[in-house]
Image: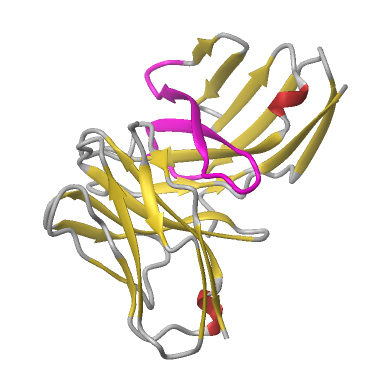
């Protein structure tokens, strides 16, 4: 089954404790991306990757890091999480290396930073 | 600076009638537009897209219209069904701008009443 898998689905943690949200896709897609969804703000892109070792900033990259060492995985790293990073996070992927292809989204990761 | 605007946070229609969801954009470099649908506790799913070389794209009950001069697009759902009740996001990309960011609107919550 074609899917984008995020882990964990839920996490409550404390300020400053490094965390990683993993994202894996099994569709051999080039483009992968991270978004956060906040009430009243919709979906905002954090980082995207057009292919292995090619990443770039979205609209809200501050406080986040990503890496793309292999095509299937695109982890989101919060080196020193803060309460304003409490949000619902989505990973997505699409074929080709471009943002205009329909993206497949994961089911989301709800992060709470206390 | 909100580049993609969905000015109606919510819309309510009767089953069988037409639903019209609107989206405005400010960046004239945008040349590809997508609509996504999102149910609670799930990731967004792709619905329909349109390139700037077209002014209409149709897929079953869903039609997207693009008015480039007005920087406006709309999604028509005819006839509306209760299962269409969801949050709808408009998104835009600029393939010629050297960036593969995807910019989303804040979303419109559609409720279709039986």
Q: Position of residue A94 (x, y in %)?
A: 30, 37
Identify which residue is drawn at 29% across, 51% down.
A24
Identify which residue is drawn at 38% across, 40% down.
B93
Residue B31 is one of the magenta-drawn residues: yes
Residue B18 seen anywhere in this rendered image of the structure = yes
Q: Position of residue B87 (x, y in %)?
A: 66, 40
Residue farthest to the bottom, as pictured: A16
Residue B57 is one of the magenta-drawn residues: no
Front-most of A9 and A104?
A9
Residue B28 seen anywhere in this rendered image of the structure = no
Q: Is residue B112 above or below residue A12?
A: above
Q: Position of residue B25 (x, y in %)?
A: 53, 41
Q: Position of residue B99 (x, y in %)?
A: 26, 49
Q: Which residues are magenta?
A: B26-54
Q: Is residue A4 above or below residue B110?
A: below
Q: How is the image coloured?
A: secondary structure
Q: Is residue A66 left or right of residue B77?
A: left
Identify which residue is drawn at 20% across, 64% down.
A67
């Amino acid at each position: 089954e074609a899917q984008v898998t995020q882990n964990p689905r839920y996490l409550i943690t404390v300020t400053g404790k490094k965390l990683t949200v993993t994202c894996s896709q099994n569709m051999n897609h080039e483009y992968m991306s991270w978004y956060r969804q906040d009430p009243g703000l919709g979906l905002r892109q954090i980082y995207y990757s057009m292919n292995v070792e090619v990443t770039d900033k979205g609209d809200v990259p501050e406080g986040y890091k990503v890496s793309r060492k292999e095509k299937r995985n695109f982890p989101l790293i919060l080196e020193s999480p803060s309460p304003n990073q409490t949000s619902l996070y989505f990973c997505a992927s699409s074929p080709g290396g471009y943002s205009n292809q329909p993206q497949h989204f994961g089911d989301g990761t709800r992060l709470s930073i206390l | 600076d909100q580049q993609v605007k969905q000015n109606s946070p919510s819309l309510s229609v009767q089953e069988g009638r037409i639903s019209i969801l609107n989206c405005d954009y400010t960046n004239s470099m945008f040349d590809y537009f997508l609509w996504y649908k999102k149910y609670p506790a799930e990731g967004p799913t792709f619905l329909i897209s349109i390139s700037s070389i077209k002014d209409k794209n149709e897929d079953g009950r869903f039609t997207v219209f693009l008015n480039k001069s007005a920087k406006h697009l709309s999604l028509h759902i005819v006839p509306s069904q209760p299962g269409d009740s969801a949050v709808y996001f408009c998104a835009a990309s600029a393939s010629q701008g050297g960036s593969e960011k995807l910019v989303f609107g804040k979303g419109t919550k559609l409720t279709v009443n039986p």
